Image (tube, rainbow, N blue to C red):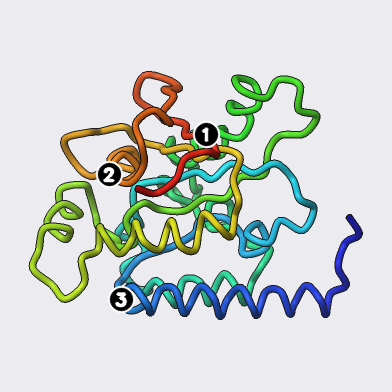
Amino acid sequence: MPTPSESDLQQKREELFAKAKNALRKHGLSSINGRVFDSSFDSLLNIHRKRTVLVVGLNGSDADKSIENERSVELDFKAPSVANLYAANWGMSILGNEFESTLQKRLKGIPSDVKELLFPDLEDVPLAVYTNAYLACSKDVSQLADLLGAARTVDISAASRQFFWEFTVPTVCPSLIVAYGNAEECPSAYRMLQDSINEDCVKKVGEATSFVYNKSAKAK
């Protein structure tokens, strides 16, 4: 498939940005502090039509509390080749030297792990698109649980699920959906997906890292 011209690509970006804004606004998520994607905006377009893995993390961290969901997508749109997973540093800074966090390393390694475990005959490592299960930032899981349980005009948990299935999945068209984090008694990517798809779509990969859902998975 030929690579689109820059003007065509920009038009596709603008159309996708408009769709993302409309979907966030539809579900009342626009003004909630959080981050929607940790991958580049252009990865959502997948112009080279690579096999895609959709990696679902928990939520935005305390570092994202200064931006709202719609603003985070706007920033991605304005710098479409920049991925937060790679451009930002989620680790410690010691004497001016920043260190990559364990979480970053594990998330970056998922596409290679998926290729090795599930697609060993695939020539290239799959394209990975990184998103969050709950579109609200917090400093930890406990604070997130409080946010999800609080009485408010928007049910963040339900709205996040609806945005995921109505916008993210149709946009990305993933071969696999990987849930990073498998806790069942507290908020997790696994729990969010478990609440919305049939359990027979689940395949466990690793002890405490991720679950994989095949592309036949559909929202209940």
Judged left or right of residue 60, residue 124 is: right
The quadrant in which residue 126 appears is top right
Name, please, the residue furthest toward the right. Answer: 2
Judged left or right of residue 86, residue 187 is: left
| Circle number at residue 28 | 3
- Residue at mark 3 to residue at mark 2: CA–CA distance: 20 Å
| Circle number at residue 141 | none
- Residue at mark 1 to residue at mark 3: CA–CA distance: 29 Å
SS category of the residue bearing label 2: loop
Discs 1/3, front? 1
Looking at the image, is mark 3 or mark 2 earlier in the sequence? 3
Name, please, the residue furthest toward the left. Answer: 151
| Circle number at residue 214 | 1
Could you tell me which residue is drawn at 16 percent across and 76 percent down? 153
Could you tell me which residue is drawn at 59 percent across and 41 percent down? 53
- Is mark 1 in CB contact (under 8 Å) with mark 2? no
In this rendering, is residue 74 above or below 182? below
SS category of the residue bearing label 3: loop
Q: Amino acid at mark 3?
A: Gly
